[in-house]
Image (tube, helix red, strand yellow):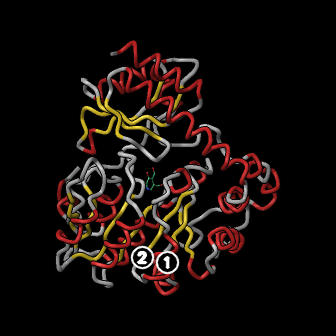
Amino acid sequence: MSSDILNNLNPGIGDLHPYEPGRSIDEVVSEFGHNEVVKLASNENPLGASPKALSVLEQLENNLHLYPDGNGTTLKEAISNHEHVPVENIILGNGSNEILELAARAFLNPSTSSIASKHAFAVYKIVTQSAGASLIEVPTCNWGHDLQSFNEHLEKSTRVIFIANPNNPTGTYNSHEEVHSLLKKIPSSVLVVLDCAYFEYVTKADYVKPLDLLHEFDNLLITKSFSKIHGLASIRVGYGIAHPSLIEVLNRIRQPFNVNAVAQSMASIAINDHEHIRKSIELNTQQYEFLFNQLSELGLECIPSVGNFITFKGDFVGKEIFTNLMKKGVIVRAVDLYDMKDFIRVTIGTEAENLKFLRALEELL
Ligand SMILES: Cc1ncc(COP(=O)(O)O)c(C=O)c1O
């Protein structure tokens, strides 16, 4: 290809690395020919989708020729009831990633910057540099976001701060007090995106109460996902909560019909499937304990996590362990792109999945 066209790339895109998703079961089956593959690579819910949400699929068949509700009325009402906020405070996204991207497109351009922690979720860099802006990375403290020092890294050009709470891939979290004191310190003209994709899994008493912050700060955008606790990663739906005028701005640049009808229907039901949510938290809490202890007994150094995954370090090259586990029918995630070359991230699965992973890992150590 002639390089002329590539010379005209928008600034920042040249040195971006495409987001690396977890390997799919189909890919691994066709490459390694296993009958049974366990995927613990993308922090999905091992219990699957809410059974109640699955039951609506049949009813959708007759309406697939129609565009979805572009306003997402029913789903926004369900979120509004669940979160106790008016629908005007809510925006729907094709995954919560889309909300992150909308925030970047609305506020970032080549003369601006955003701030995120080092080892923070990879999409912050992608959306920042795609908008031509530069990302300022703040060093971590015990692998967690050092929110106290974010303020010192603020530049005149800074328009957006991304906080993953909990963070992926480290599983660390920030307390309510830490987020509150950051919001108090920074100018109200800087947007703070509080990414709560794993919100429901966190059982810590001092964890952030996002809506309390929203009552106090207009420059806050909270994002949540249906891909994790609700087990709906494949249908792509997430949402943002913010002041209505901020939501209105983001709606101006949102694609019409960004959330499809299947996603809207399933998510409206999943958010109220309290039994499925409860079971998912219970399994995660119990299996976290088990996996953390087993990995520690194998001499591996686990970063304490409040999410549905554990990132651990060993005397190995993460990418090699990742490939060798795949050969044994277990898909995990190497995190070298997060500058964590000797780490592996594993999603907390069912007991059977975790045992299969542990057995395979033990054979490799
Ligand atoms: C911290 C964090 N934020 C956001 C997302 C995006 O989730 P989704 O776009 O599936 O809602 C993920 C997905 O892994 C994540 O780990």
Nearest the viewer among 244 and 305 is 305
Amino acid marked by disc 1 = Ala
278 relative to 195, above or below: above
Numbered disc 1: secondary structure: loop
Task: Look at 33% across and 60% down and name the residue there.
Answer: 124
Task: List x then y, in percent, for residue 20.
Answer: 37, 44
Question: Is 337 placed left or right of 87 in the picture?
Answer: left
Question: Is 231 placed left or right of 183 in the picture?
Answer: right
Q: Which quadrant of the figure has residue 187?
A: bottom left
Q: Which quadrant of the figure has residue 160?
A: bottom left
Which residue is most to the top?
363
Task: List x then y, in percent, for residue 191.
Answer: 35, 77
Q: Which residue is mark 1?
A: 242
Discs 2, 1 touching: Cβ within 8 Å:
yes
Q: Which residue is mark 2?
A: 220
Task: List x then y, in percent, for residue 5.
Answer: 22, 60
Amino acid marked by disc 2 = Leu
Task: List x then y, in percent, for residue 275.
Answer: 73, 49
Q: Is mark 2 within 8 Å of ligand 1?
A: no
**What numbered label is drawn on residue 360?**
none
